[in-house]
Image (spheres, rainbow, N blue to C red):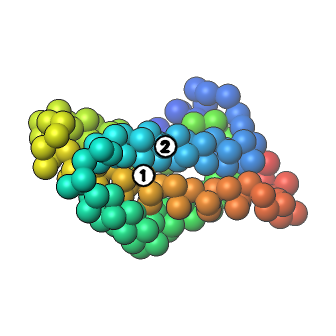
Amino acid sequence: MTDTLARFLDSLHPRASVRVQFIAAALMWLIGSSILLVRGVGYVQDRYWHAWALAIGLALGVFKSRVLLDQVARKAVARIRNRGTAGFLGFFSIRSWALIALMMGGGITLRHLVVAPGVIGAGIMGAIYIGVGTALLLADRIFWEAIMKPASPDAAERA
């Protein structure tokens, strides 16, 4: 069922080469990490008692990148390579798009329920945003490396 749905959704948008899909994925992670880092720094700047949040967020981001997101990015690169030229938005799987939507919704909900500027909740939210943003930014290098690598000869056959 999921495979049929994926093929149907794939047919609804323009085709893109492997390189274009890598660039789209890399830019998406870069934009997402930038938004999170700017928001996170906004929560901790000008507050001397939030400096710990910045340090914790950066440390958690490095850890999360190495333990989780590097592997996710490698799987996405392998998926794109194996698919070859395909629908543009297919650079991430349906499951990945659903997870992105869930995480965005969770972040927005948490921000509206918990955080008030100038209170400790802002420091915690800042640490979370900085951590996730740092992890995305560090793991994004895997997409950029894939963009810079020349395509293998068998990739041209799949395209």
Which residue is under mark 1? 133
Q: Name the residue at 82% across, 59% down.
A: 151
Q: Amino acid at mark 1?
A: Gly
Which is more toward the observer, 17 or 73?
73
Q: Pointer 1 and pointer 2: residues touching (CB < 8 Å)?
A: yes
Is residue 109 visible to the viewer in this orientation of the structure?
Answer: yes
Disc 1 residue crowd, few under 14, some 14–19, many 20+, Cα 10 Å: many
Quadrant location, the N terminus: top left
- Measured along the vertical axis of the image, is residue 98 above or below residue 63? above
The spot of residue 77 in percent (x, y) is 62, 59
Which residue is under mark 2? 34
Residue 141 position by quadrant: bottom right
Disc 2 residue crowd, few under 14, some 14–19, many 20+, Cα 10 Å: some
Separation of marks 1 and 2 at Cα, in angstroms: 7 Å
Q: Name the residue at 63% across, 36% down.
A: 88
Q: Name the residue at 14% across, 36% down.
A: 116
Is residue 85 visible to the viewer in this orientation of the structure?
Answer: no
Residue 85 position by quadrant: top right
The spot of residue 138 in percent (x, y) is 53, 61
Q: Amino acid at mark 2?
A: Ser
- The secondary structure type at the circle numbered 2 is helix
- The secondary structure type at the circle numbered 1 is helix
